[in-house]
Image (cartoon, grey):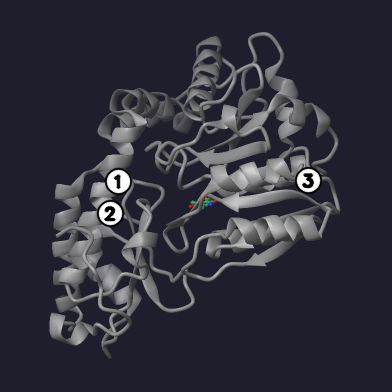
Amino acid sequence: MLLLIPGPVTTDARVKAAGAQDYAPWDNDFRQLYRQVCEGVLAIAQAEPEEHVALALPGCGHFAVEAAIRTFVPPGGRLLAPSTGAYAARLQKLAGDAGRVAVPLHVGATERVDPQAVAAALERDPSLTHLALVYSETGSGICHDVPELARIAHALGRRVIVDAVSAFGALPLELRALPAVDAVVLTANKCLEGLPGAAFAVARRDSLEAARGNAGSWSLDLADIYQHTLAPNAGPRFTPAAPALAALAVALELYREEGREARLARYTANMRTLYDGVIGLGLTPYLPPQLQGPIVVNVHAPDAPTWHLQLFVDALKQRGYVLSNFYNTEEPTFRVGCIGAFGADQMRQAVDAMGAALRDIGITRERAGLSRFIPQPLTA
Ligand SMILES: *Cc1c(COP(=O)(O)O)cnc(C)c1O
C-alpha cells in the first residue's frame, strides 16, 4: 500500500522495523538516541547550535504549531497570519482558541503571499508582533517564500513562526540566516519520512528564555521543554513517542545518505510525473505549473455525474494506493502527496491506477471534463 495522503507518508522498511520495538524512554541509551535525533533535526534546519535548539513534543503537527504560538506570542498578543489555505486556517484557529489574535491577510487561493502586502500590513499595525507562515501550504500545494518574508519581518522588527510541517527536510531552510524566526515547526512523518507521533520545534534559545510563562499550558510550553533540555543527560520531559523517535533516528540516517537536494529532486520528479500523468488522464491540476510546489498536487474533481470522492478513494485503495478522502480547497479537488519513500516509477504506476479507478467508477477520459484551463504539462 502506497500512502499518497500526503502525510503520514510511506516509509522505508528499515524505518518501520525500528518502530516495531519496545523502548524505555528514560533508559540512558534512549536518552542518547533522543538527543541525537534532536541534533539531527537541528542540523537539517541549518541552525546555529549556540543560538538554536530542536525541541521534541509528542503528538501531531498541530500540537507543535499551537505550542509555538502559545510559547512565543504572549496571551492576547497579535500575529499576522496570511490566509494561504486550509493549514493557515488551522493555524489561525489554534491561535484564536489559545487566546491570541490571528489577524488574517487575504491571499488568493492560487496565489503566493505578496511580500509587499505583508510589509504594508505590518507597517500599518505596530501591535502585530509576529508573522506566522505556512511554508508549503498543503491545502493548495503552493510553497511560499519564507526566507524573503522572514527578512521583511526582520527589517520591520517583527518575529516569525513557521509551520514547515510539510516542507521541512525538502525545501531549503537556513535558520542561522533568519534571525527573526523564533520557531520552525515540523513532524517526523512528512519529508523526513519517519513514523507519525513525534513533532518538533526548532527555536531560538534567547526567545525561549524570554518566553517563560507565556504558554498558559504546561503540556504545550516549549520554554519549559527547553529548560528541561538544559539538565545534564537530559531526556524527554514526559513519555515521548519512543518508537517514532527510534524510527526517526533511522530515517535521519537515510536522509543524510540521500541529502536534501536529492530528496527534493525525487519529490519534484514525483510531482512532475503526477502532474503530467493526471493531465494525460484528462484531469486538470488545481495549480498552473509556475505555482505548483513539489509536495502535494491538487487535482480538480472530474466534472462527471458519477464522480464521488469516497468511491474513487475506495477504488484506488483496492489497487494499492491511498488518497485523502476529503477536500481541502473550496472547489472540489482531490489531493495527492508526492512525498515519502518512493520514486517516479511508483508514481507512474499510481497514475495508471488512478485512471483504472476512474474507469471503475464510470469515468472515462472523454467524460472527465477539461473545464477550467487548458492544462500545460510540466515536461515536454
Ligand atoms: C501535516 C501538516 C500539519 C500537521 O498536521 P497533523 O495532522 O497535526 O500532524 C500542519 N501544517 C501543515 C502545512 C501540514 O502539512
* Residue 115 x %, y %: 60, 55
Q: Are marks 1 and 2 in contact (CB under 8 Å)?
A: yes
> First in sequence: mark 1 or mark 3?
3
Amino acid type at circle 2 is Met
* Residue 233 x %, y %: 63, 10
- Mark 1 is surrounded, within 10 Å at the Cα level, by few (under 14), some (14 to 19) or many (20 or more) other residues, namely many
CA–CA distance in space, label 1 to label 2:
6 Å
Quarter of image, res 202: top right
- Depth check, front residue: 301 or 119: 119
Quarter of image, res 185: top right
Give the residue pinned by disc 2: 271
Secondary element at image label 2: helix
Amino acid type at circle 3 is Val
Label for residue 73?
Answer: 3
User: Measured along the vertical axis of the image, is residue 132 above or below residue 266?
Assistant: below
Secondary element at image label 1: helix
Q: Is residue 320 left or right of residue 373?
A: left
Give the residue pinned by disc 1: 267
Some atom of ligand 1 lies within 8 Å of the CB belonging to the residue at label 3: no
- In the picture, which quadrant includes the C terminus? bottom left
